[in-house]
Amino acid sequence: MSKLVKATIVERVVEVNQELPRKVCVIAVEQFIEIMIESLVNGVSIRIPRAGKLVPYFKKGGRPVRNIKTQEVMPMQDRIVVSFSLSTTKTDRNGTFIPRKNPSEMMQELAERPVLLERLERSTRGRLSPEEMKKLTRTLAEDVVRLFGELFCEYRNQCLPVEIRGLGSFRTSKMNYKSVRNPKTGEMLDVTDNNQPLRTVFREGRELKKALAERLAESA
């Protein structure tokens, strides 16, 4: 349990869907990650229940930065970046409204993915009626989305890394506050080790970063 990766999610999905071929579960997880990437590239944030949300936003360039390889100082380019936020608001740090995709919406989209439907149909060899096939895809999609959220929270709460190839990586640490101020009363309260707030930093994966750069180039 050193870190959460795509294979860990697949194994959990396989455990609760033992009647399905493993390949179908793999495709379901891969398609779910694709939905997350596509949503972020299209400017839609992703809500992860009891954890936070992934928020895409435009980051203006111009300020000088140093190339770590050449040590050359150059202006930073405009970018679309994704950050992990605990905020429940629907705006980014610039105050721009950002639509949000909830787990139920991702579940519905996953259940309607043609590649998943085709693979399920092939694996069941036509034994199921259209109604049974629809129920099966909906159940599988629901399991994938639910288990991802549960595993993410489980690993995040233990400050263990989450690395989803294509999407990106999450690093979580405790803030180590000695005391915090109650915003309502102004009273300073001691913070125990068990109640330390968590800080999660997200770093885009290669596939997501490339797709974001292409979207920015298209809109230029």
Image (cartoon, rainbow, N blue to C red):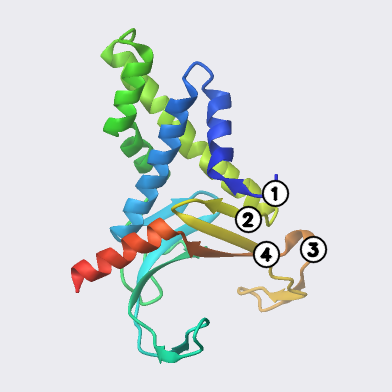
Could you say where residue 15 lies in the image, as x and y percent from the top left? 58, 25
Given this view, does label 1 or label 4 mark the residue nearer the observer? Answer: 1
The answer to whether residue 34 is left or right of residue 15 is left
Could you say where residue 139 lies in the image, as x and y percent from the top left? 42, 25
- Which disc is residue 161 wearing? 2
- Choose top left, top right, bottom left or bottom right for residue 193: bottom right
The residue that mark 1 highlights is: 2
Marks 2/1 in contact by CB < 8 Å: the verdict is yes
Which residue is the extreme one toward the front?
70
Going from N to C along the chain, the mark reached first, 1 or 3, is 1
Going from N to C along the chain, the mark reached first, 1 or 4, is 1
Which element is circle 3 on?
A: helix
Gap in angstroms between the C-alphas marked 1 and 4: 15 Å
Which element is circle 1 on?
A: loop
* Residue at image location 35% in from the left, 89% down from the top: 62
Gap in angstroms between the C-alphas marked 3 and 4: 12 Å
Going from N to C along the chain, the mark reached first, 3 or 4, is 4
